[in-house]
Amino acid sequence: MKLTEIELRRVALPLVTPFRTSFGEETARDVLLLRVATADAEGWGECVAGAEPRYSSEYVDGAADVLRRFLLPAVADLPDLHPEAVAPALGFVRGHRMAKAALELAVLDAWLRARGVSLAGHLGATRERVPAGVSVGIMGSLPALLDAVAGYLDAGYLRIKLKIEPGWDLEPVAAVRERFGDELALQVDANAAYTLGDADHLAGLDPFGLLLIEQPLPEEDLLGHAELQRRLRTPVCLDESITSVKAAADALALGACRIVNVKAGRMGGYLEARRLHDLCHARGVPLWCGGMLETGIGRAANVALAALPGFTLPGDTSASGRYYHLDVTEPFVLRDGHLEVPKGPGLGVEPLPEALAELTTSVERVPP
Ligand code: SMG
Ligand code: MG
């Protein structure tokens, strides 16, 4: 396989409602999509980097730059392009995992489409639909939060995740438990907003029976997470820290987490994410699929991944309407609290030409 066309496309999608986390508020997404073509098929990838380097060190302009200057030329130079060859060919570039993941996904999509195989089937999915959770941003007030949670539960979401930060943690959790009861599957995500000095305060979450607390401490702090886990009954789940299978194996060996959030973009691609799945599944470590406010392109890939047997908890794989009025693909809809896994070749979804035209802010052709 050889690439004949490469396109970097930027799309702007206003969010249906602002999404606030401990690192900032987003009201729209500026997404980098990658389109590649070969003699037989085209393939799409989505880069999950944000507009600013707040969730991680990557950001969308940086991802476009590293793709254009280093990653795309390295892949275009491969004599026989195969999805498994992408990550090794990009290994000379340190980091930039979200940019690498977007490129690997586009190649994987084209390769699978040419063979008539679905991404879910290729990865080893065993389910036709996946349970959907929803991530609820930090709100200005408890009544606003309770209304938002009530709306998501009415829509059928099977698990609620509350974003927390210092000053917005015990009270919102207590209010949600009080209003919706102990049966509600509930978890929290701090996006690295705390320090080990907050351990006693965070232990105040233990009586609420949360499924997990996600990434309380900074990305690099595995030992801190291990110490914190010793002082909490609530299971620690890592997100930002899990940049590779090796990082996950280290975190588990240290006792830095008991649960793992899988995000392909954060770890350089869906093939590395599948290896992480295999490791955790073999060891009985609970897994779930995270989200990065993806368009239908990245969402299709996440839903395929989340259909693997080791994903034992609902993911941040919400319906398209939770994020966008208009998506670039047919929207993913919630049925009975689940999203359907696409069955068609590759991602099984394509951008809709009209929606794509309306949302596109720039297109750049890169010579293959
Ligand atoms: O895609 O539903 C989604 C967002 C889920 O909370 C979510 N993602 O840390 O897990 C996380 C955040 C990262 C993205 S915040 C812009
Ligand atoms: Mg997270």
Image (cartoon, rainbow, N blue to C red):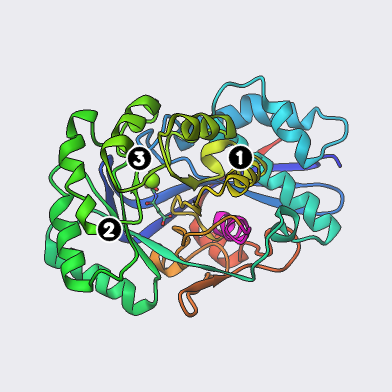
Q: Nearer the viewer, residue 153 or 308?
A: 308
Q: Amino acid at mark 3?
A: Gln
The answer to whether the residue bearing label 3 lies less than 8 angstroms from the nearest atom of ligand 2 is yes
Q: Earlier in the sequence, mark 1 or mark 2?
A: 1
Residue drawn at 63 percent across, 25 percent down: 69
| Quadrant in the picture for residue 350 | bottom right
Q: Amino acid at mark 1?
A: Ala
The residue pinned by badge 3 equals: 215
Q: Earlier in the sequence, mark 1 or mark 3?
A: 1
Q: Quadrant of the C terminus?
A: top right
The residue pinned by badge 2 equals: 209
Residue drawn at 13 percent across, 62 percent down: 142
**What is the magenta range?**
297-309
Q: Is residue 108 above or below residue 334?
A: above
Q: Is residue 33 magenta?
A: no
| Figure disc tally | 3
Residue 41 drawn at (x, y percent): 81, 54
Q: Are marks 1 and 3 in contact (CB under 8 Å)?
A: no
The residue pinned by badge 1 equals: 101
Residue 251 in view in this figure: yes
Q: Is residue 362 above or below residue 92?
A: below
Q: Is residue 15 above or below residue 29?
A: below
Residue 11 drawn at (x, y percent): 50, 51
Q: Is residue 295 above or below residue 100?
A: below
Residue 92 drawn at (x, y percent): 66, 19
Q: Earlier in the sequence, mark 3 or mark 2?
A: 2
